[in-house]
Amino acid sequence: MDDDQKQRPESLLPYEKWIEQALRHVVARAVQHVGEHGLPGGHHFYITFRTDAPGVNIPARIRAQYPHEMTIVLQHQFWDLGYDEDSETLSVGLSFGGVPAKLIIPLNAVVEFADPHIRYGLRFQPEDAPPAEEPQPEPESPSGLLAPPAEPETQPSEPGQVVSLDAFRRRSPQ
């Protein structure tokens, strides 16, 4: 039997899990950097996360629209973006239908991260999500930032939808 035909023995060390944890920290570093320095050039982020994962804190009305998964776009209109190393959570202020909200997302709830400007993306194995926790009250946030209301999912098994802000931006008179 050739060496190529031999199967690799099963590892007793969780290398795949360690690699995934390290790549999740790439997401954390990117969020932390942008929170401190802003988005450079044309960079922007698409972050997909499990809304039903433990520790996710989003407004009840948003959780009702996206009971399993949601994608947010961080490009022009967001605030208070950060990463807390102690709790391993991302936080960001966004506006949904003109109503500001703060989202708190544990790093292990993130299932996809992309920076389309450079065609960079990561996909993670979702952890088994237990039933959703009781919704938290919506925190007070700065106002004045607008985003369109998110479209509800048509089927619960579909991935979250990306909310595009292009249709709602003010256009300069011609």
Image (cartoon, rainbow, N blue to C red):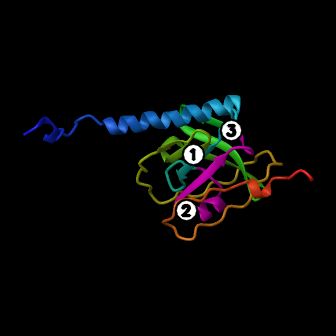
Residue 126: x %, y % from top left: 43, 50
Residue 160: x %, y % from top left: 56, 59
Cα–Cα gap, marks 2 and 3: 31 Å
First in residue order: circle 3 vs circle 1: 3
At label 1, which amino acid type do we have? Ile
Q: Which residue is mark 1?
A: 105
For this rendering, which residue is in front, 147 or 56? 147
Q: Quadrant of residue 16?
A: top left
Label annotation for residue 148: none
Q: Which residue is mark 3?
A: 42
Question: Which portion, as a residue range, is magenta?
Answer: 57-79
Numbered disc 3: secondary structure: loop
At label 2, which amino acid type do we have? Pro
First in residue order: circle 1 vs circle 2: 2
Numbered disc 2: secondary structure: loop
First in residue order: circle 2 vs circle 3: 3
Camera-near label (2 vs 3) is 3
For this rendering, which residue is in front, 35 or 43? 43
Name the residue furthest right.
Answer: 173
Camera-near label (3 vs 1) is 3
